[in-house]
Image (tube, rainbow, N blue to C red):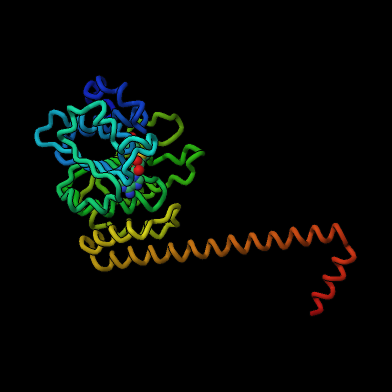
Amino acid sequence: MIRYEEFERERLDPIYDTVAPYSEMSKNERYFLNGIIRSLKPRKILEVGVSSGGGSALILNAIRDIEGARLYSVDYTETAYRYPDKPSGFLVEEKFPELADKWHVYRGGDVSRFVEEIGGDIDLLMLDTVHSHPWETLNFLCILPFMKADSWCVLHDISLFADTKFQNALACRYLFTAVVSDEKISPVSDYPGRPANIGAFRVSNVTMKYAGNLFGNLFIPWGTGVLDKDFGDMKKVITKYYAPEQYDAFCEAFAFQKDLMKRRKEDRFSVWLNHKVWSFKRLAKRACPSLYYWLKRHLKKD
Ligand SMILES: C[S@@+](CC[C@H](N)C(=O)[O-])C[C@H]1O[C@@H](n2cnc3c(N)ncnc32)[C@H](O)[C@@H]1O
């Protein structure tokens, strides 16, 4: 098996120090992404989750000499969340303008809004968005119909939850585990004792055949909600490219999660109220025990 993180490192080396401060990956992860692209030579790449553009620059550098290769990048926000006065992906325009002729960038919406315009025959997907469930599963479901048979998906932050600051970052692992694929790979982890934080899987006919697993994922409790406008964009894709029963499962999952969130909110309120009543009783018992017991007896009688 090829160790992608070792493959053609010399391609990334010359730009490494310029890219690293803006890229949200570790060293092995950057070389893994570079290596998989250099080895597979994809012609149509979709990157979802751009931020400053460290990943975009790395990918564009890796496809520089691949005839006809193109990178399509999508970010939900117009501006980079770490540099709010700059557009998402600014690094490419600022530091690597010579690579931008192979780049199409879409800013200001979920990928489901742009994916039909980007079109099919995607050879490689680089997915790195919210990390809170259900986002990566939803992103992947909306992109899957546009991926070539025997294409690849690279998924970042599949073990981010190993960092105790990000315990709820489970979305990428849920997707990586549930997706059916002939081959799943990961590089050597940069953090001893923890699983690798980047992985890749082959997207083939079985992936679409068992997409039901991913619709099932949507019933696992969500860490983050989905805005109505994004739900609307996703619905358009799901209804057009999946079977009616899968569309129904998608809508049922949304209705279930909405109800679950409502019930959790109500439960939180009743826990809060019970605690307040308990604290008040304790205070009253200490401050004026005779009144407390008198009230208790008489309220019980009623
Ligand atoms: C972890 S950062 C991406 C880092 C980048 N891949 C890199 O290697 O430097 C996540 C980005 O995903 C974007 N994002 C979040 N949800 C998204 C969605 N549904 N579609 C597209 N982009 C999204 C965020 O705005 C943010 O810029």
The answer to whether residue 178 is left or right of residue 281 is left
Residue ID at (24%, 41%): 73
Toward the front, the furthest residue is 85
Residue ID at (58%, 63%): 267
Figure quadrant of residue 150: top left
Q: Position of residue 264 (x, y in %)?
A: 53, 61
Toward the left, the furthest residue is 67
Figure quadrant of residue 78: top left
Q: Look at the image and tell me whether residue 154 can be seen.
A: yes
Residue ID at (42%, 48%): 132
User: In which quadrant of the rendered image does the C terminus lie?
Assistant: bottom right
Number of marks in the image?
Answer: 0
Q: Position of residue 142 (x, y in %)?
A: 26, 54
The answer to whether residue 281 is left or right of residue 52 is right
Front residue (pair 64, 193) = 64
Q: Look at the image and tell me whether residue 2 can be seen.
A: no
Q: Position of residue 141 (x, y in %)?
A: 28, 54
Q: Is residue 195 above or below residue 207?
A: above
Front residue (pair 288, 175) = 288
Quadrant of the image where one finds ligand 1: top left
Q: Position of residue 184 (x, y in %)?
A: 29, 42
User: In which quadrant of the rendered image does the N terminus lie?
Assistant: top left
Toward the bottom, the furthest residue is 302
Figure quadrant of residue 269: bottom right
Q: Is residue 279 above or below residue 102?
A: below
Residue ID at (18%, 37%): 103
